[in-house]
């Protein structure tokens, strides 16, 4: 996860050609999952990580673990195909996830069929999100790309950790936005996106690309009966991620920044977003 | 729904035409997924057979005259109304379009509806079902891959426009198809001509598609103007607002991007309270179907 929201200060520097220029130096936050043979590795500190921003080794300011409350955004497909038993499974899974949120965590519910609807904005009142989920009625086509884009845009930049959980059981049949453009927007967001796909043999490439880009994962389930387990797995995994913060040095302020995060001296698996877009 | 004729095997030399019977398979689809496959009797097939036998009404001994359905304008109108109806209810028999164009290859309306059928076949709703189709190997619904369907749609729209250059709706749809094929310059040329039409629905489509085409060309200013015009025509539509948001985000204006999405999320929740013509683009070409059907019924 990357955020470019915290303004640490400005630099005023002399130049041979110009009198002065100022540049914002912004903190970058990277949400990282470390596993060793599928088991989460805990207890790591700033000295254990190496972060390279466009190949340039950075100095890590801070590493947080399980200390920052979560903002959990639920973006659920409620098109016509999610009816009957599938809807019940989705509601049960959503309720299970909401029940497991901590006191300071917040949640929101957005749904998409052909229309994109914010059922409940980001709130600490879990009961309201629960009720909103109970009230949904499936209808129409699937605007997965539009709905996901709207959810990404909901993410606040006030320092919480933003998890976007997208569920869909079908291909996009109704969006206006093109997948590649939404992927581009995701590069500027600090959301970590996890997807749960119940589609079957033909998966949503968009969801897979998005989750890989943002450092999340796509879980493919055979049946919506497996939704509760998938949702809880995602929440548990997200809680056990490290939040690394650094102030980029030695790299251009704008453009695409490729990220490479490693744990020193250990053969572990590190999952984080592939990079971030700064500026335009 | 899509229909496939089932060819009935008839021994050669029997003198009987080797044509499909009225029975066929209907493929039921919803939201890009196959719901089922069912044997059905197509009344459209029966209708086509009957109309193939139409003879000139002023013939004194009509039974000895060769059938000439092309000479009867009712037949032409029947094919047009049928095509519009099939598109409207998304229950399509490709054979109807094929036979209609065999009889009336130069009719701009029939060409237009046939083009829109192929444009629809190129969409993900149909393509995803076709890729995963669970049916007997010898059954074909006549749907090709996305690229081939778009090519066919382009050719048919162009033929419609050759016959009727003032057919602005065909021009707008041709513009969209060209954009889908990655030919953005040609798409812009067609869509700009579409702006001349007075009907708000078509103005909306022209502006929405222009927004997408300008965006594809990296012309953010023109894209924004097009989306703003579309949003002004249909204030309750979400698509142009998403377009505006994406443009703002790409320009690094996160606040404007979030503001445009906030406008979407403040739209009324119920479908009947909000309308985005983009949602019904695949059937919008058939909006006058009731008039066409009434015209046909007057003949009885």
Image (cartoon, rainbow, N blue to C red):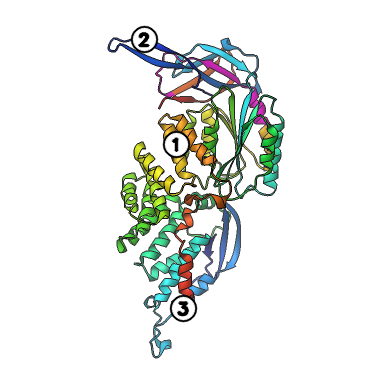
Q: Residue pushed farthest bottom?
A: B60
Residue drawn where x is 66% and y is 22% of the image: A39
- Residue located beneath label 2 in the image: A13
Secondary structure under the numbered disc 3 in the rendered image: loop
Image coordinates for residue A168, horizontal then vertical, percent: 59, 41
How many residues crowd around disc 2 within 10 Å: few (fewer than 14), some, or many (20 or more)? few
Q: Which residues are magenta?
A: A232-256
- Residue located beneath label 1 in the image: B246
Does A132 appear above or below A66? Answer: below
Viewer-side residue, A19 vs B80: A19
Q: Quadrant of residue A13?
A: top left
User: Which numbered disc, 1 or 3, marks the residue that appears first in the sequence?
Assistant: 1
Q: Quadrant of residue B161?
A: bottom left
Disc 1 chain ID: B
Disc 2 chain ID: A
Query: As drawn, is A116 to the left or to the right of A253?
Result: right
Disc 3 chain ID: B
How many residues crowd around disc 3 within 10 Å: few (fewer than 14), some, or many (20 or more)? few
Image coordinates for residue A147, horizontal then vertical, percent: 54, 40
């Amino acid at each position: 996860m990357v955020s470019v929201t915290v303004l640490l200060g400005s630099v005023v520097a002399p130049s041979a050609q110009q009198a002065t220029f100022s540049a914002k130096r912004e903190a970058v936050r990277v949400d990282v999952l470390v596993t060793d043979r599928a088991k989460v590795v805990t207890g790591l500190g700033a000295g254990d990580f190496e972060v390279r921003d466009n190949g340039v080794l950075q100095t890590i300011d801070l590493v947080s673990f399980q200390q920052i409350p979560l903002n959990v955004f639920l973006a659920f497909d409620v098109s016509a195909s999610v009816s009957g038993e599938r809807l019940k499974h989705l509601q049960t899974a959503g309720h299970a996830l909401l029940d497991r949120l901590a006191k300071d965590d917040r949640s929101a519910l957005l749904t998409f069929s052909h229309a994109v609807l914010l059922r409940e904005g980001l709130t600490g009142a879990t009961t309201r999100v629960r009720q909103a989920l109970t009230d949904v009625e499936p209808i129409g086509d699937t605007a997965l790309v539009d709905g996901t884009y709207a959810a990404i845009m909901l993410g606040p930049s006030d320092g919480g950790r933003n998890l976007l959980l997208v569920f869909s059981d079908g291909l996009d049949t109704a969006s206006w936005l093109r997948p590649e453009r939404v992927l581009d927007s995701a590069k500027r967001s600090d959301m970590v996106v996890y997807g749960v796909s119940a589609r079957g043999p033909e998966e949503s490439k968009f969801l897979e690309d998005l989750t890989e880009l943002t450092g999340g994962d796509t879980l493919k389930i055979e049946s919506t009966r497996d939704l509760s387990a998938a949702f809880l797995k995602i929440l548990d995994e997200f809680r056990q991620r490290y939040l690394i913060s650094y102030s980029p040095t030695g790299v251009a302020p704008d453009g695409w920044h490729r990220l490479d995060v490693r744990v020193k001296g250990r053969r572990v698996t590190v999952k984080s977003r592939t990079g971030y877009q700064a500026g335009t | 729904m899509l229909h496939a004729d089932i060819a009935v095997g008839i021994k050669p030399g029997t003198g009987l035409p080797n044509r499909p019977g009225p029975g066929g398979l209907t493929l039921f689809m919803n939201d890009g997924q196959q719901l089922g496959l069912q044997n059905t009797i197509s009344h459209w097939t029966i209708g086509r057979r009957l109309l193939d036998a139409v003879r000139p009404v002023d013939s004194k001994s009509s039974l000895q005259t060769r059938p000439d359905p092309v000479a009867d304008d009712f037949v032409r109108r029947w094919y047009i109304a049928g095509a519009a109806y099939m598109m409207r209810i998304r229950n399509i028999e490709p054979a109807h379009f094929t036979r209609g164009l065999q009889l009336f290859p130069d009719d701009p309306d029939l060409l237009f509806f046939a083009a829109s059928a192929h444009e629809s076949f190129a969409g993900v709703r149909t393509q995803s079902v076709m890729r995963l189709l669970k049916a007997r190997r010898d059954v074909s619904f006549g749907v090709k891959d996305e690229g081939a369907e778009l090519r066919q749609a382009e050719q048919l729209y162009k033929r419609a426009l050759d016959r009727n250059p003032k057919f602005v709706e065909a021009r707008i749809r041709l513009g969209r198809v060209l954009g889908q094929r990655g030919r953005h310059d040609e798409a812009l040329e067609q869509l700009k001509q579409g702006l001349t039409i007075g009907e708000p629905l078509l103005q909306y489509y022209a502006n929405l598609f222009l927004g997408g085409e300008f965006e594809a060309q990296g012309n953010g200013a023109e894209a924004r103007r097009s989306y703003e015009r579309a949003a002004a025509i249909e204030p309750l539509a979400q698509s142009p607002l998403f377009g505006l948001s994406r443009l703002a985000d790409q320009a690094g204006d996160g606040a404007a991007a979030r503001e445009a999405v906030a406008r979407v999320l403040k739209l009324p929740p119920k479908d009947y309270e909000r309308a985005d013509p983009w949602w019904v683009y695949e059937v919008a070409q058939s909006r006058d179907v009731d008039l066409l059907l009434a015209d046909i019924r007057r003949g009885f």
